[in-house]
Amino acid sequence: MKAILVQPPFVQLNAPYPAVHYLEAFLKAQGHDARSFDHSIALYRAIFSRPGLAKVFADVEAGLAAGRIQPKNQEGAELERYLSYKDLYLGWIDGITAFLSGGDPGFAHRLSAAAEFPRGARAAALVEAAGGRLGPEEARGLATRILEDLGDLIAYALDPDFATVRYGDRLARSQGDFSEVLSALDSAWFVREVYSPWLSDFWRARAAEAPAGEDILVLITIPFPGCLTGALACARAAKASLGSRARIALGGGYVSTELRNLKDGRIFDFCEWLSFDAGYGSLASILARLGAGDPQDSGTGPGLYRTCVRGDGEARGGVRAEGFQAAGDGAEAGFAAIEREALETVFPDYASADFSAYLAAVDSGNPMHRLWSDTPWLKFSLAHGCYWQRCAFCDTQLDYVRNFVPARLGPLLSAIASASKRHGLYGIHFVDEALPMRDLLAFADANRARAATGERAYHYWGNVRFDPSWTEDRSAYLAASGLVAVSGGIEIATEAGLAMTDKGFDLAGLVKTLVGMRRAGLLVHAYLIYGFPGQAPGDILDSAEVVRQLFQAGLIDSGFWHRFVLTRGSRMMEDYAEGGMPGLRPIDREGSFADNDLEFEGEAAFDPWDAPLVAALETWMAGNEQDQPAPALLARLGLGRSPRTTIASGLIEALIGRAEAELDAWIPEPSRRVRWVGGFPRHSPSGAGKKSRLAWVFRGEVVELKLEPEGAAGLASALASLVSGPEETSYGDFLKAAGLKPESPEARALRGAGLLAL
């Protein structure tokens, strides 16, 4: 069957979002003709082009003339500046987007040296902060600010929901009434004036490519709430162009979380199916039903798996869900097995992706923060789901968390190699919920083996848990094997907060993990949460103070504060339903559409913290005021009077001292695997009566050991064997071969200069 997979706007600008490419690979493996299209980057490039901006300015001017746009105060002054700069924006825009997508490197000198370029508020602020002149190395940041200024223009004058460099910002609350979604679909400037006309051309071209009369399977992913309106517009246009030939399924993270309790069947005016969870089993069941000649989903064909269709309810149709019970011995079990097999073995080669279209936007000067936006990455997963599954706030009842399925390394490596060869990219962003250590170490081994054969090694990063599996030696080995950065959840950075969220580690354990990562040279990003039900103001302040000290000590490089959102699929709600969580009082309005997010009594008390916490974090990420206690900074940033922090000013430094002592004193268990990441050891035999010399380079420094000739020869042989790896040598066997004892000075010297026990 012919299948068209679509990522609707807007998601990231720097690389393809992976969902459609995973499903494309799955369909191709089943023998179907599948191709993915990223409407997100296509529409962004269409708007931020000379013709696109000409329409933007024309619509703004028409709105002003008709009185639909009423300039006010400072926004009015900014609007005047945009309109005055219209010709400059039109003249510069194609050069800016070409430059950000990797073309015309010399444009950096042109932009940084230009006396006249369009300066909205963001671009002007960047230039002013640089003292009025930027260097060529800062040109990408300036180009990004110019695009952000134009995004502000669109949001102010034409479409308040429009945003520029963003990663699918979620809605503040679940949208419980589908009528409001339908209203936005018809009223939003972006959909009405830009996307819908573009979609008409797109689907007309797809119709011309397909044989007459042939059904076309259209799969549209909705990873974030911000993609919903675009997805519906895309589906509507597909039906308008293809008629009954279009067989449409909507899926993705938004569907699998927000629409799990759907009651309003009107969404099936836009599609035939809603596919839940990973999508492989649902898609296989849809294809089986179509193959059995039941295109109307009358229920007479094979059963569907984790799929919703229009039901026979009141009004315009209810919802019928199929295949959500535990799989038995029938077709449902078969589709469950298909899904698990796909999770283990299906990976994209990104054959349909055009990486030259994506933009490397520099929306932050922070080196860790920039990983999300200004570098193109190949996105893969080492595992589906999370191996921990206990964090109180997380959707532990939902498949994307609770169904932990590690990938098979062979198919993954094959897909990565194919994608790298095709696109010339060797950077990988692992998008796991949390990278499992066993599989990460196996990937590192394979990456080193690849390099040893003369192939180019990969560099990679991803989300982790700051748990005890991250020992110092493992961090060092992964860093030496291509890992450049990690992001992970600290959430509430206090002992009480870590216990409240059930993170599985305490503050001392967190610091010990971070010290090991710092020694390895890894960049670290921290996810932070505030506003838990019953969380006292003092605990939020204490958490902020600990975060400040972590920045001051260099243990984290960037972070992001999340306002806590209570969800139906969380462990907290599971505990609440069983009579636990006595302090939690959810407000359940039971909407008929998206209702995964819940309000709770007392959450308004956290509103005053929103802006000050974000501003404080931005200050610390910029390297400023890290030596000042958090309460004083938060007060200046608008929090006002707050309780005193109970965190001692030297808490993190004390925990660092304790962690370093423990790490330095650690003697590995004999059963641990060992790896060598230092330079090749060179053995210089001695003359009669003199000690022999072993020397190598580790992290830029020459290391040498002088030993008796017999001992030096044995150690040199053991190290040479280890360097030639990758056989599974244990620490105990290595020491035996080297003639060393675990507590010997030579063994300790080796462990600090290239010998790692995993």
Image (cartoon, helix red, strand yellow):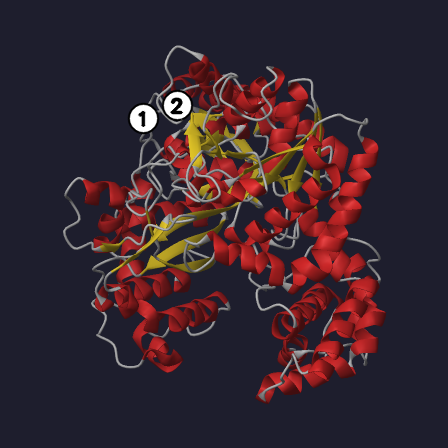
Circle 1 Cα neighbour tier, 10 Å, few/some/many (<14 / 14–19 / ≥20): few
Tell me: 319 left or right of 105. Answer: left
Q: Residue at x 80, y 62 (%)?
A: 49
Name the one closer to the observer, 309 or 721. Answer: 309
Q: In which quadrant of the rendered view does residue 146 lie?
A: bottom right
Residue 646 percent across, percent down from the top left:
20, 67
Q: Quadrant of the N terminus?
A: top right
Q: Helix, strand or loop at disc 1?
A: loop
Compared with 656, 96 (above or below) is: below
Residue found at the far front of this picture: 315
Name the one closer to the observer, 475 or 126. Answer: 126
Q: Which mark is residue 234?
A: none
- Look at mark 2 in the image and give the residue it sits on: 731
Asked if the residue under mark 2 is in contact with the one under mark 1, i.e. CB atoms within 8 Å, the reply is yes
Q: Amino acid at mark 2?
A: Tyr
- Look at mark 1 in the image and give the residue it sits on: 669
- Alpha carbon of mark 1 to alpha carbon of mark 2: how far? 7 Å
Name the one closer to the observer, 162 or 109. Answer: 162
Residue 183 percent across, percent down from the top left:
55, 59
> Which of the two labelled residues, at mark 1 and mark 2, occupies the earlier sequence position?
1
Q: Amino acid at mark 1?
A: Glu
Tell me if residue 758 can be seen.
no
Q: In which quadrant of the rendered view does residue 100 lie?
A: bottom right
